[in-house]
Image (tube, helix red, strand yellow):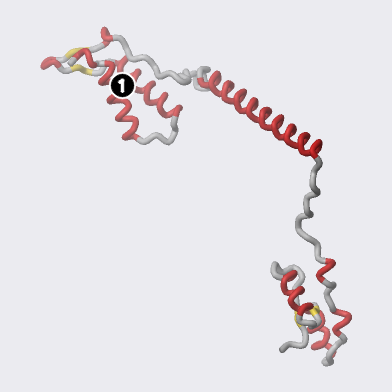
């Protein structure tokens, strides 16, 4: 069994090692004890290099003192007020975002907010021979605005999801043609 325990005070395990060393009734010394003993080629007195007893070790977090009823009531009231304040801030921020979505951005493009753009009127449709239709400029503009609207609502939307939404929108809009 060892005669000395050489510890490092900044180690995570230091408090436990110090307690176990004291429980084993062995001296817990610093690394300086070894360095100085080797430098002088003689065993130094370990009393000059001892660590303090564990009673001097501080807890990382002090224990909370019990609160009386008034203090508990006050603490609960403060938490409720803080929660309602945060909720009001979130609501205000959401309202600001909604109004900002309907404003014009720096490039002069209109943001559509929570409603999707309206499709072009039927009068803009160009029918080709064989009963097929060609997309008009207004329909192309509408599709572009609708895709932009979808991306503003969800910037992570996939191309497949955009295609499905366009298909369902076109199918609902032009259902009377079929």
In what element is the residue under mark 1? helix
Q: Nearer the viewer, residue 147 or 5?
A: 5
Q: Is residue 57 above or below residue 20?
A: above
Q: Which residue sits at x=81%, y=66%?
A: 57
Q: Residue pushed farthest left?
A: 130
Q: Which residue sits at x=82%, y=87%?
A: 37
Q: Horizontally, is 101 left or right of 41 in the view?
A: left
Q: Which residue sits at x=46%, y=20%?
A: 114
The answer to which quarter of the image holds residue 74 is: top right
The answer to which quarter of the image holds residue 132 is: top left
Q: Horizontally, is 136 left or right of 43 in the view?
A: left
Q: Is residue 58 above or below residue 169?
A: below
Q: Position of residue 89 (x, y in %)?
A: 64, 27
The number of callouts visible is 1
Q: Is residue 127 above or below residue 17?
A: above
Task: Classify the position of the N terminus by image quarter.
Answer: bottom right
Q: Nearer the viewer, residue 63 or 49?
A: 63
For label 1, the residue is 169
Q: Nearer the viewer, residue 128 or 10?
A: 10
Q: Residue pushed farthest bottom?
A: 41
Q: Which residue sits at x=71%, y=29%?
A: 81
Q: Horizontally, is 131 left or right of 156 in the view?
A: left
Q: Position of residue 128 (x, y in %)?
A: 16, 15
Q: Residue pushed farthest front?
A: 69
Q: Position of residue 133 (x, y in %)?
A: 19, 17
């Amino acid at each position: 069994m060892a005669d000395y325990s050489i510890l490092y005070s900044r180690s995570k395990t230091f408090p436990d090692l110090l307690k176990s060393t004291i429980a084993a009734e062995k001296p817990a010394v610093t690394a300086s004890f070894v360095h100085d003993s080797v430098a002088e080629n003689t065993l130094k007195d370990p009393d000059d290099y001892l660590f303090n007893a564990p009673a001097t070790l501080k807890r990382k977090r002090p224990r909370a003192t019990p609160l009386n009823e008034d203090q508990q009531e006050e603490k609960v009231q403060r938490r409720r007020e803080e929660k309602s304040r945060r909720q009001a801030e979130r609501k205000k921020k959401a309202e600001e975002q909604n109004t900002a979505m309907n404003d014009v951005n720096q490039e002069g493009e209109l943001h559509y907010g929570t409603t999707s753009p309206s499709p072009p009127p039927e009068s803009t449709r160009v029918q080709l021979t064989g009963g097929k239709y060609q997309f008009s400029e207004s329909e192309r503009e509408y599709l572009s605005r609708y895709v932009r609207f979808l991306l503003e609502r969800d910037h992570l939307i996939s191309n497949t999801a955009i295609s499905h939404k366009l298909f369902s929108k076109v199918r609902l809009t032009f259902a009377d043609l079929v």
